[in-house]
């Protein structure tokens, strides 16, 4: 049963792998083009494990910003993972803390979305298969890109980063088809992010954090007393 659940989770991660690999390859290529060694490129993907924040780190590195500025900005843009981990913690109340700690390290926007949509009662082994498969594919993508950095033309590598946005859209559309409320929350979060960053001129990292928190708060009332598929 446990092996079956782990395999099921790994299979559920395959759509994410399709998105993670090209984005990871693009990151590996760009990192090497900026003079970051193969070891540190792969280490960054292994430790940070955040597509948007890692590309932001490369951009800040290219602009010559300081070490602490990059660390703080990365912390801000990745702070949403704390919110997601808290949500996962509520679904795994009876799971030992050691398992929760390991699973929290594999939480990303994409894995959280798949776990929330496809698994109303998360199983530790299912989540292990989902998270581990996604994590390994991201690292392999980075390693592949770093190794192929001298072969792939720069104009192609730059265009590959659009796969990150395509991946988000690919996750959103199936969810919206099963619940119009999820689509409403996505639109509202997008509008909040546009308000914070466009009108109030808040930093993109803080803007994403505020819109995520407010969107989650709105979601509590939207789904209160009802099922997700209503």
Image (cartoon, helix red, strand yellow):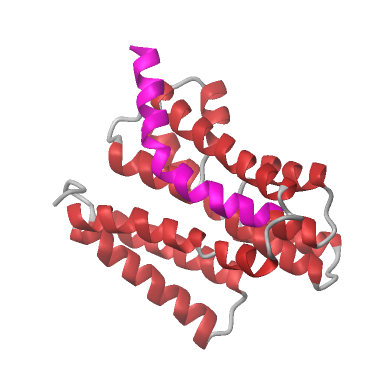
Judged left or right of residue 9, residue 134 is right
Residue shown at 54% from the left, 36% from the top = 104
Which residue extends farthest bottom?
A: 199
**Relative horizontal placement of residue 67, taking residue 98 as reference (left or right):** right
Nearer the observer, 171 or 113: 171
Residue 226 on image: x %, y %: 16, 49
What is the count of numbered marks? 0
Q: Which residues are magenta?
A: 1-28
Residue at the limit of the structure toward the left, as seen here: 230
Q: Is residue 37 above or below residue 103?
A: below
The residue at 22%/52% (across/down) is 224
Quarter of the image where one finds residue 207: bottom right
Q: Is residue 48 visible?
A: no
Q: Residue at x 31, y 64 (%)?
A: 185
Residue 127 spot, x, y in % from top left: 43, 30
Task: Confirm whether residue 18 shows in the render.
Answer: yes
The x and y percentages for residue 137 are 56, 39
Principal SS element in the magenta part?
helix
Residue ID at (49%, 42%): 85
Q: Is residue 6 magenta?
A: yes
Q: Is residue 154 left or right of residue 7?
A: right
């Amino acid at each position: 049963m446990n092996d079956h659940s782990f395999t099921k989770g790994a299979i559920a991660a395959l759509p994410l792998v399709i998105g993670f690999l090209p984005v990871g390859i693009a990151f590996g290529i760009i990192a090497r083009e900026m003079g970051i060694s193969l070891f540190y490129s792969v280490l960054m993907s292994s430790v940070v494990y955040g597509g948007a924040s890692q590309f932001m780190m490369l951009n800040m590195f290219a602009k010559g910003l300081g070490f602490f500025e990059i660390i703080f900005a990365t912390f801000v843009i990745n702070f949403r993972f704390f919110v997601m981990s808290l949500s996962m913690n509520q679904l795994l109340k009876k799971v030992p803390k050691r398992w929760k700690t390991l699973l929290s390290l594999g939480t990303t926007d994409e894995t959280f979305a798949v776990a929330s949509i496809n698994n109303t009662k998360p199983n530790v082994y299912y989540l292990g298969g989902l998270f581990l498969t996604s994590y390994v594919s991201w690292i392999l993508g980075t390693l592949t890109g770093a190794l192929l950095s001298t072969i792939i033309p720069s104009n192609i590598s730059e265009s590959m980063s659009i796969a990150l946005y395509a991946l988000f859209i690919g996750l959103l559309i199936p969810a919206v088809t099963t619940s119009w409320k999820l689509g409403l929350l996505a639109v509202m979060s997008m509008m909040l992010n546009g308000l914070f960053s466009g009108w109030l001129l808040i930093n993109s990292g803080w803007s994403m954090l505020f819109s995520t928190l407010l969107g989650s708060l709105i979601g509590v009332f939207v789904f209160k007393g009802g099922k997700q598929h209503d």
